[in-house]
Each structure stands twice: as C-alpha cells, then as structure tokens.
C-alpha cells in the first residue's frame, strides 16, 4: 500500500510503511513549534524509522534542537530568497548507516567532474512533448515496467490523472511509432517558486540515447516560462547515469539523504542536485 499524503495541521506530509518514514513536504509556519511534537507522536505511534523534512532556514535551529540534522542544502529554495535544509531525524539508528558510502562518494566525484553542456543536440527519431490525460494508461504501463516499487503510485493511471489536475506536469519522449518510451515529471510549488524534476523512467531498449537529458532541457524551458526560480532533484545516489544527467545540465550537488527512499524493493540513499533557473548562482555542500 502506497504511503499517504495528508495534512498535519496546515502542513503537508507523506507517511507510511513503504518508505518507513514521515516526510514533511511543506511546512506551515502557523503549525510551529507544535508540529515537531505532532510528527514525533505520529512516528512513535506507527513505529517509523526516519523523519525527512524540507525546512526553511528560519526554522533550522528549532529543528536542530529537536534532534534533526541537515543532510542537504538548496540555496534560495523558497521564492528565490530563502535556503532550504533537507533535514533528518533517525528513530532507528540502523537507518542512518549507509554501507555503500564509498560507492556513493565515487558516483558524486564522477558526476562533479562532468562539465556542463552548453548545447544539447536532440536525439534523432524521438519527439519530446507534454503528456496529456489520454496518455495516463500508457504512462502507468511504462512506469510499472521500469519500477518494481516506487515511493508514489505512478503505475496507477488514476493517480497520474489526479496529479495532472494539480501542480504536476509530465513530459515524455515518443519513438517513431508514437509510443512513449521515456518519462519525467515536474512537480511545481508555485507559491515557493521551486520545482522538483523527478520520476525519470526510460524503457530498457531506449536507454543510453540521451533521452533523460533532453527531457530535462525541455522541462527547464517550460519551468522558466512559469517563473520557477529553482529546480532540484532527489536522485538515486548509486545511479551514475542520473547523477551525471543533472551534472551535465549544470546542476550543483547539495548533499546525500541516507537510506531515504524505497525504490524497487529496498531503501536507497538519494543525492540532492539543484539549479538556479533565473541565472543566480548558489553555493555547494558536500
């Protein structure tokens, strides 16, 4: 059963046993500081191993006092003005241990050595476009083929249709037969002027052709039109391909979220990458 997205006061959270965590997606100032206590109550009631929270810089010290640590930083995340700390609190200390730290460090090093591409030549024989409601069944089939399990029910056409009615825009690449072979989504937060570039999935027979890079370029163009100030992603830390995809596009490394997300049946650490879409330059953490 997929983790639930719900409200805790006026704040938005996701929680459940799939990811064995509470994820504070959007913090409402009016809920603080009581929100910290309410999250802890939920964790203890359900027996979750981790809390993952997107925390505005103004609340950093309050979360730190409550036992949270900053695992990643995205500068100017909120309205192009205020930094965001991706913070964690581990209720199961075993969850905070990443056995593959050296492998992940190597992936980060390789990705950071990549030089940003000034111009990306579109792959031949593919068309890149925004997905529509009629595409949902085909999209769900492709997501289901690529991901054995995923943090969100992207293999469900009704879920995809429902999110399209909100602030999620899906993009796809079609082959010469007009079949969708690669997908990604842009999850917008119009109020905060940031967007998460996520849900990258390419059919196995169409990989290593630069489809993800081209999708990302198309998505960025659309996000600039919508006046998003910052784009970011939370990418699988061991995936050399996805980490390089964002490095090629000029994204900066923000940090690693330890054993944060359940993908394909196991908890995986995730790397945060970010880019100022308005041409501003932010700092980098390691």
Image (cartoon, helix red, strand yellow):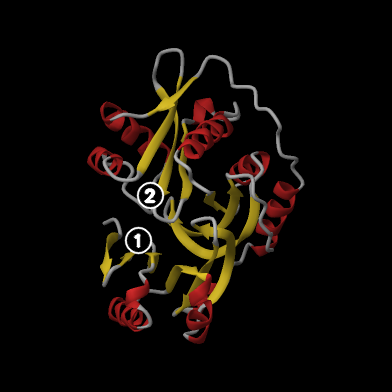
Q: CA distance from mark 1 to mark 2?
A: 9 Å
Task: Look at 53% across and 49% down and name the residue there.
Answer: 229
* Residue density around tag 2, few if under 14, some if 14–19, many if 20 or more, within 10 Å: some
Task: Look at 67% across and 52% down and name the residue there.
Answer: 281
Task: Look at 39% across and 54% down and name the residue there.
Answer: 191
Q: Are marks 1 and 2 in contact (CB under 8 Å)?
A: yes
- The spot of residue 196 in percent (x, y) is 47, 49
- Quadrant in which the C terminus appears: bottom right
Left or right relative to 3: residue 252? right
Residue occupied by mark 2: 149
Q: Secondary structure at mark 2?
A: loop
Indicate whether 184 appears above or below 17. Answer: above
Indicate whether 259 appears above or below 275. Answer: below
* Residue density around tag 1, few if under 14, some if 14–19, many if 20 or more, within 10 Å: many
Indicate whether 177 appears above or below 153. Answer: above
- The spot of residue 68 in percent (x, y) is 50, 79
For residue 4, what is the image quadrant? bottom left
Upstream in sequence: badge 1 or badge 2:
1
- The spot of residue 121 in percent (x, y) is 64, 22
Left or right relative to 100: residue 134? left
Residue occupied by mark 1: 18
102 or 181: nearer the eye? 181
Please say whether residue 269 is visible from this viewpoint: no
């Amino acid at each position: 059963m997929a983790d639930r997205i719900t409200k805790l006061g006026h704040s938005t959270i996701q929680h459940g046993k799939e990811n064995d965590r509470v994820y504070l997606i959007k913090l409402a100032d009016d809920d603080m500081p009581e929100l910290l206590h309410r999250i802890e109550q939920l964790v203890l009631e359900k027996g979750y191993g981790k809390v993952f929270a997107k925390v505005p810089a103004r609340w950093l010290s309050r979360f730190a006092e409550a036992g949270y640590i900053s695992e990643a930083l995205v500068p100017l995340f909120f309205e192009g003005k205020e930094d965001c700390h991706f913070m964690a609190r581990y209720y199961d200390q075993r969850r905070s241990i990443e056995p593959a730290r050296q492998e992940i460090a190597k992936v980060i090093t390789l990705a950071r050595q990549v030089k940003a591409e000034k111009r990306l030549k579109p792959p031949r024989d593919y068309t890149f476009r925004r997905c529509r409601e009629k595409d949902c069944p085909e999209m769900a089939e492709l997501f289901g083929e690529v991901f054995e399990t995923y943090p969100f029910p992207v293999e469900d056409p009704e879920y995809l249709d429902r999110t399209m009615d909100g602030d999620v825009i899906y993009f796809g690449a079609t082959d010469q037969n007009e079949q969708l072979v690669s997908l990604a989504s842009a999850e917008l937060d119009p109020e905060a002027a940031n967007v998460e570039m996520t849900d990258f999935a390419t059919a196995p027979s169409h990989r290593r052709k630069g489809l993800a890079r081209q999708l990302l370029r198309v998505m960025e163009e659309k996000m600039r039109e919508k006046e998003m100030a910052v784009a970011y992603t939370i990418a699988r830390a061991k995936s050399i391909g996805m980490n390089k995809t964002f490095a090629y596009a000029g994204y900066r490394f923000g940090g690693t979220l330890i054993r944060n997300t359940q993908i394909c049946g196991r908890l995986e650490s995730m790397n945060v990458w970010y880019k100022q879409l308005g041409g501003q330059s932010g700092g980098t953490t390691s």
